[in-house]
Image: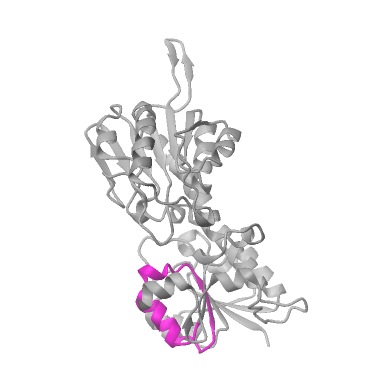
Amino acid sequence: MAVKIAVLKETRANERRVAMVPAVADKLAKLGCAIHMQAGAGADSRIPDSAFKNVTFAANPQGLVSDADIVVSVQPPPAEVIAAMKEGAILLSFVYAHREPELVKLMRDRRITCFAMELVPRITRAQAMDALSSQAALAGYYGALLGATNLARILPMMTTAVGSIRPAKCLVMGLGVAGLQAIATARRLGAMVEGYDVRPETKEQAESLGAKFVDTGVDARGAGGYARELTQEEKDKVAAVVTKHIQQADLIITTAAIPGRPSPKLISKAQVDGMKNGAVIVDLAAEGGGNCEYTKPGETVQIGQVTIVAPLNVPSLLAEHASELYAKNQFNLIELMFDKDQKFAVNWDDEVLAKACLTHAGEIKNEAAKKAVEG
């Protein structure tokens, strides 16, 4: 029997991505899967139904998932769709359990096996399944473009008949995947770029992309590749060094986000108040409240002569390529669920599958999620 995969149309506000693209649908068909999609699922990503071959379309999402072995989406499906899934079916999507406690309880009680894309471990072997990184790379790229289009000046040096224009100074704060992509893009656009992170091992990565590294002397390496919380003394030490760079910058792009926790505040109100007239901050951590104390998630605000841009769900603004990368991430995860004879059999000894699992067999398997949901 072919493994039935159901692909849902996204229903959440401002979500333009889709969990399937034609090239990935073809790969899944070769793996022995039967692809069923909700009609119009790719429309917001500019992928019409006609672009998919050997895919069956249906209008009703509950009917679509009722006999599906695997259900895929970007955002978690509505409760009524999860309730319509058969017991033991598999769901692949972003979830963020701390934001969706009732949905997680429903999946637990319905005995749905959920692999949450944000839980894919950030190890070398799982890089091809790491949707957080693939989407963050696009966000970093777009962050630099948002900065360029909100500035009242240009980024590169330009020589004209009446003289030369100096290049803009850009500071990127938080040098994960998004931050490094922001550096690369700002450099390609001609800006003079500095990079800052509390993890000193990022210095070499920033410099390899042509940025100068802002060294504060504070090492805040934490678990899982994320930064740990700073002590007050460390915060004061960092602020003393970083303030000068913040107030010299024309453009600042902040990207420091920790899944499941509020975004750390990297820029204080006092630091913003001392910034150049016309400076722009692009806060890519707005989903978690933002890295700047003045940030209003989802809004662009003017503080004196400083503009703070805080977009939500940035990858969705690049829906075509975001969908393509996300669908490939999910394909690589689904492929792990097939054995060497191409038989569908989830191997729970596989580290990637075990760590990405949120719910299974009536239990919440991830400890942090269990604590958040069940107290």
User: Does 31 sit above or below residue 159?
Assistant: below
Pinpoint residue 82: horizontal percent, then vertical percent: 43, 82
- Queried whether the magenta region covers residue 88, the answer comes back as yes
Give the residues drawn in magenta, as a range: 84-112
- Residue in the foreground of this view, choosing between 344 and 124: 124
129 versus 79 height, above or below: above
Residue 53 visible here: no
For the N terminus, the quadrant is bottom right
Q: Residue furthest front?
A: 233
Q: Is residue 361 visible?
A: yes
Side (left or right) of 298 relative to 142: left
Residue closer to the observer: 165 or 161: 165
For image coordinates 45% across by 39% down, the residue present is: 218
- The location of residue 155, given as percent across then percent down, is 44, 28
Q: Residue at x 65, y 57 (%)?
A: 124
Image height of 307 relative to 50, above or below: above
